[in-house]
């Protein structure tokens, strides 16, 4: 009985640790996504208006395919 309780406790600890890792990874992904969006916006700003419309659509389509 004690072995089973210990195994359950170990499993719960492992689940908790993996959950924390998953949450941290999701936060990193959110941060990187925000950075990519900012870079795209800066690039669009730096392009001329006509080029921004043409290239911006292509960049946004490409970015959406990554998601």
Image (cartoon, rainbow, N blue to C red):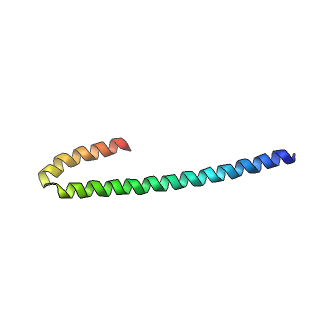
- For the point 34% across and 41% down, the residue is 65
Left or right of residue 8, residue 52 in this image? left
Outermost right residue? 1
Q: Residue 46: image x %, image y %? A: 18, 57
Give the quarter of the figure containing the N terminus.
top right
* In this view, 43 is above or below 57: below
Looking at the picture, how far across and down is residue 61, in whole percent? 28, 43
Q: Residue furthest top?
A: 65
Residue 7 horizontal side relative to residue 34, left or right: right
Residue sitting at x 46%, y 55%:
28
The quadrant of the rendering that contains the C terminus is top left
Residue at 35% x, 57% y: name it.
Answer: 35
Q: How many marks?
A: 0
Q: Residue at x 34, y 53 (%)?
A: 36
Instruction: Please provide percent x and percent y for residue 27.
Output: 48, 56
Q: Looking at the picture, how far across and down is residue 13, in whole percent?
A: 70, 52
Q: Would residue 66 appear left or right of 42 to someone viewing this image?
A: right
């Amino acid at each position: 009985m004690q072995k089973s309780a210990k195994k359950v406790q170990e499993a719960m600890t492992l689940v908790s640790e993996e959950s924390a890792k998953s949450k941290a990874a999701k936060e990193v992904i959110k941060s990187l996504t925000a950075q990519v969006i900012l870079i795209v916006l800066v690039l669009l700003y730096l392009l001329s208006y006509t080029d921004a419309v043409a290239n911006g659509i292509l960049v946004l389509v490409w970015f959406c395919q990554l998601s």
